[in-house]
């Protein structure tokens, strides 16, 4: 069974009758963060299970890939938008915020400036994205132990300050990559089925529970 989603006036995802296997509107997940934090690599890891090693080619404008996830016997189609982190493409990115159902905001644990810029990204998100957008903060490149300059505790503290779920990821080792996308897809799926009797889904609780059962922070 496929899930189809439409948007109410308030931008909330609401349940809609769907034809067998026909997806009316895929769930849009947008990757944002400074240039070089690993947005494209995270997407490629999630989509193809591979790591793009070698020379770094910056995304120009915006790119997208689709992936269908099985969540509780439902097929949830994610359309994942990979945005360019470079400042000169910022106006292109702004135009896409309002259509995003979820945002994965990345910094690079080996790059302090990318972490310091998270507050500016949050301001931008507040300005351009839907008020009820699902948001998660990701500290990427957790595998790069020797180059690390941002401690996990610093990421946790920042996330707590802004009440955003948080996890460290690695596009290189695959750490928490599937979990990050699955968690936001689950949240969106639960929102889309508001009228059901299911208990309210808590994204942060789900993430913490899954990380704990996976041994938390292994790289
Ligand atoms: N060690 C390590 N390197 C990574 C990881 N993710 C990405 N990289 C490297 O970081 C560089 C930038 O990765 P990209 O995915 O292209 O970065 P981006 O955020 O898409 O950059 P823009 O397209 O400019 O916004 C590349 O050289 C990657 O190989 C990771 O998890 N661990």
Image (cartoon, rainbow, N blue to C red):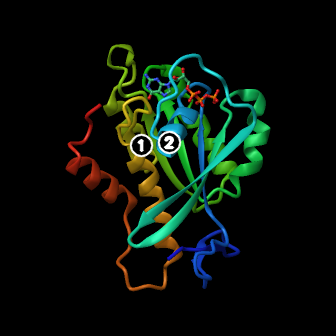
For residue 173, above or below residue 26: above
Q: Residue 51 at x, y = what percent?
A: 47, 30
Q: Residue 133 at x, y = what percent?
A: 58, 58
* Number of numbered discs overlaid on the protein picture: 2
Q: Quadrant of residue 205?
A: bottom left
Please, which residue is most extreme toward the top here?
Answer: 146
19 sits left or right of 155 in the view: right
Q: Quadrant of the C terminus?
A: top left
Q: Which residue is mark 1?
A: 177
Q: Nearer the viewer, mark 1 or mark 2?
A: 2
Q: Is mark 2 within 8 Å of ligand 1?
A: no
SS at circle 1: helix
Label at residue 48:
2
For residue 14, above or below residue 51: below
Who comes first in sequence, dot 1 or dot 2?
2
State the residue at coordinates (61%, 82%). 18
Q: Nearer the viewer, residue 195 or 28?
A: 28
Q: Quadrant of residue 175?
A: top left
Q: Nearer the viewer, residue 91 or 120?
A: 91
- Distance in Å between CA atoms under marks 1 and 2: 12 Å
Q: Residue 82 at x, y = what percent?
A: 63, 41
State the residue at coordinates (36%, 56%). 204
State the residue at coordinates (60%, 74%). 4
State the residue at coordinates (56%, 62%). 77
């Amino acid at each position: 069974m496929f899930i189809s989603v439409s948007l109410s006036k308030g931008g909330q995802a609401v349940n809609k009758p769907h034809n067998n296997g026909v997806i009316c509107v895929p769930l849009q997940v947008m990757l944002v963060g400074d240039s070089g934090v690993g947005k494209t690599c995270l997407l490629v890891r999630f989509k193809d299970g591979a790591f793009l090693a070698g020379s770094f080619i910056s995304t120009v404008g915006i790119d997208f890939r689709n992936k269908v996830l099985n969540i509780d016997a439902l097929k949830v189609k994610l359309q994942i938008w990979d945005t360019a982190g470079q400042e000169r493409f910022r106006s292109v990115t702004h135009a896409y915020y309002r259509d995003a159902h979820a945002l994965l905001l990345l910094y690079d644990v080996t790059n302090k400036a990318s972490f310091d810029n998270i507050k500016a990204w949050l301001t931008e998100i507040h300005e351009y994205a839907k008020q009820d957008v699902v948001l998660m903060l990701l500290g990427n490149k957790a595998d790069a132990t020797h180059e690390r300059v941002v401690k996990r505790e610093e990421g946790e503290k920042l996330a707590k300050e802004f009440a955003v779920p948080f996890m460290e990821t690695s596009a290189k080792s695959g750490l928490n990559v599937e979990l990050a996308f699955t968690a936001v897809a689950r949240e969106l799926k639960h929102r889309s089925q508001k009228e059901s009797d299911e208990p309210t889904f808590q994204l942060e609780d789900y993430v913490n529970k899954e990380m704990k059962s996976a041994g938390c922070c292994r790289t």
